[in-house]
Image: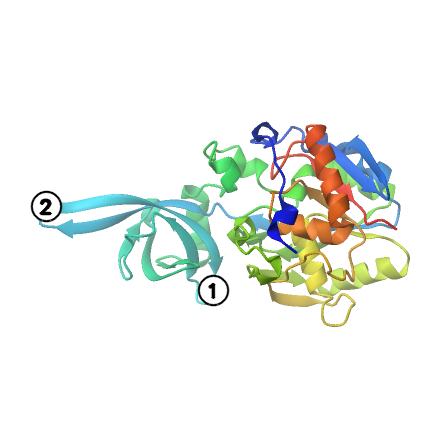
Amino acid sequence: MKLSDFDFTLPDALIALRPLKPRPSSRLLVAQNDAIVDSNFTDICDFLRPGDRLVLNNTKVIPARLNGRRRRISDQGETYASVEFTLISCDENGNWLSLAKPARRLKIGEEIHFNAGLKAKVLSKTSEGVGLSFNMTGNAFDAVIAEIGTMPLPPYIAAKRAADAQDNIDYQTVFARELGAVAAPTASLHFDQKLLEKLRQHGVNFSEVTLHVGAGTFLPVKTDDISNHKMHSEWGHVSIEAAHDISQTKKSGGRVIPVGTTALRLIESAARETGEIQAWTGDTDIFIRPGFKFNVTDGLVTNFHLPKSTLLMLVSALIGLDRCQEIYDYAIKEKYRFFSYGDGSLLFPKQ
């Protein structure tokens, strides 16, 4: 398939720069069989059955955007230049891969100074990013990042406004527990505790899994033939309990509905080897596009995604490209709010 198959024109006014309050007050588009229904997220129970299971990604976003200074000494004395870093992933030695802006003048071996006593040495420069070794690790590092870092808002929001203190709340799910993501599982931002309890009372079950969403989720697809696209890798974990409960739901006739493309990618990764979900831990670079065989997923809660994105390709794989185009045309016509802080959808493949 061609990249152009996943293109569409989105009016700039439909890009949401802030979420609605309270969280479930956003709109909800529901697509089931041939119908498209306009609803509100707070009424999602109307479209779920007792015995269905929602799979939640409990990853927690770190304030991964840091402003640093590089120092240079010359005949004219000391000079400083600002460099913005967005942390992407941490390796087993505690070193971080980051995106730097500007990166061109950074030199391997030089030291970057941040506030609160944080320093980093530049270890490497590759096409994937800049490697950094910090002078702090563990809890001390986490505490300093929480103090001086800002939320790494998606590029389409960051280009229009800077992150602020409100984003520390808005860009975090109410069930975030496992620190490590540099982007939020945004479909989950629609849930608050009141709605979660309403769903439990309705008979909907929950399982939590962890996929640490990376900045690669925002990288554009650059190959015209999408099968040549190299997917970014992200770390995930499905517990024995979660795998068992998800498996039992399917066996008892309930539907397994991941909340967000990240949860979907993880549970399908955990079922890749045998066709049935298993406990699983590791890095996944699964690329779900039309033609993919779903082993676990029966439906999907998700937001409205970027043109030409791997997330849109995933949605097209689940419900069909023509159906996806129909839904997106409808959403634009009806002025649904798009992207991370936008409205939600509940999508089911045609039976």
**Would residue 345 be visible to someone looking at this image?**
no
Element under disc 1: loop
Q: Are marks 2 and 1 in contact (CB under 8 Å)?
A: no
Which numbered disc, 2 or 1, marks the residue that appears first in the sequence? 2
Location of residue 128 with respect to 334 vertically, above or below: below
Q: Nearer the viewer, residue 187 or 201?
A: 187
Q: Position of residue 331 (x, y in %)?
A: 71, 33
- The quadrant of the image that shows the N terminus is bottom right
Q: Amino acid at mark 1?
A: Asp
User: Horizontally, is 284 left or right of 291 in the view?
Assistant: left
Location of residue 120 with respect to 282 vertically, above or below: above
Location of residue 27 with respect to 309 vertically, above or below: above
Q: Which residue lies under the disc numbered 2?
A: 76
Are there few (<14), some (14-19), or many (20+) residues within 10 Å of tag 2?
A: few
Res 279 quadrant in image:
bottom right
Q: Nearer the viewer, mark 2 or mark 1?
A: 2
Q: Which residue lies under the disc numbered 1?
A: 91
Q: Nearer the viewer, residue 9 or 118?
A: 9
Q: Nearer the viewer, residue 115 or 46?
A: 46
Q: Position of residue 70 (x, y in %)?
A: 27, 49
Of all residues, the one furthest to the left in this rendering is: 75
Which residue sits at x=59%, y=32%?
Answer: 16
User: Horizontally, is 75 left or right of 98 in the view?
Assistant: left
Which residue sits at x=71%, y=56%?
Answer: 290
Are there few (<14), some (14-19), or many (20+) residues within 10 Å of tag 1?
A: few
User: Horizontally, is 135 left or right of 71 in the view?
Assistant: right
Q: Position of residue 132 (x, y in %)?
A: 37, 58
Q: Amino acid at mark 2?
A: Gln
Q: How many marks?
A: 2
Res 336 quadrant in image:
top right
